[in-house]
């Protein structure tokens, strides 16, 4: 899978929040594949623990599919958790950038 920044080449990403720590990339892809063609699913992990951070980005090839995903998937249940779905606003951060962000428990 390629690691293109969100929005590059005409696609559009949504952010999916409140995911279970048991949810996998494949589970997110399966849940959203009924909406349209998915370019990429990215689930950030905590740099220090390696555990999922509870959210994911789903990049659709067609920007209209991202809008449909928000309308149809917001407040649905995935793996026992009600998720919220919204438009991703920023480009994906690099791993080096994420390492520099101080964890909340250190603040």
Image (cartoon, rainbow, N blue to C red):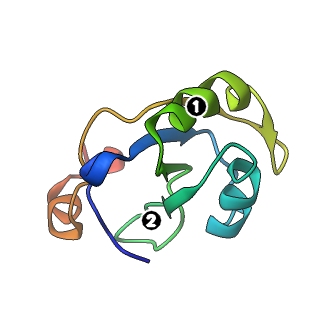
Q: Residue furthest top?
A: 71
Place of residue 96 in the rendered image (x, y in percent of width and height, measured from the top left): 15, 69
Residue 30 higher or lower than 71, as above or below = below
Residue ID for mark 1: 85
Disc number for residue 57? none
For image coordinates 62% across by 34% down, the residue present is 69
How dense is the environment of label 1, judged by Cα within 10 Å: few (below 14), some, or many (20 and up)? Answer: many
Q: Which residue corresponds to the image point at 73% horizontal and 62% vertical from the top-left?
A: 27
Viewed as shown, does residue 27 lie left or right of 104? right
In this view, the residue in front, 37 or 28, is 37
Looking at the rendered image, the disc whose residue lies closer to the viewer, 2 or 1, is 1
Identity of the residue furthest to the right in this view? 80
Point 34% across, 69% down: residue: 47
Is 74 left or right of 82, judged from the image as shown? left
Circle 2 packing at 10 Å, graded few (<14), some (14-19), many (20+), is some
Q: Quadrant of the N terminus?
A: bottom left
**Residue 72 % position (x, y):** 72, 27
Q: Earlier in the sequence, mark 2 or mark 1?
A: 2
Query: Left or right: 58 with respect to 5?
Result: right
The residue under label 2 is 45
Q: Position of residue 7 (x, y in %)?
A: 30, 45
Query: Outermost residue, bottom direction?
Result: 1
């Amino acid at each position: 899978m390629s690691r293109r920044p969100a929005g590059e080449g005409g696609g559009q990403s949504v952010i999916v929040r409140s995911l279970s720590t048991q949810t996998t990339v494949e589970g997110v892809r399966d849940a959203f594949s009924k909406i349209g063609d998915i370019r990429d699913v990215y689930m950030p992990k905590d740099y220090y623990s390696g555990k999922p951070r509870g959210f994911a980005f789903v990049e659709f090839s067609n920007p209209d599919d991202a809008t449909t995903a928000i309308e149809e998937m917001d407040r649905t249940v995935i793996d026992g958790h009600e998720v919220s779905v919204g438009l991703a606003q920023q480009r994906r951060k690099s791993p080096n950038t994420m390492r520099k962000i101080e964890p909340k428990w250190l603040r």
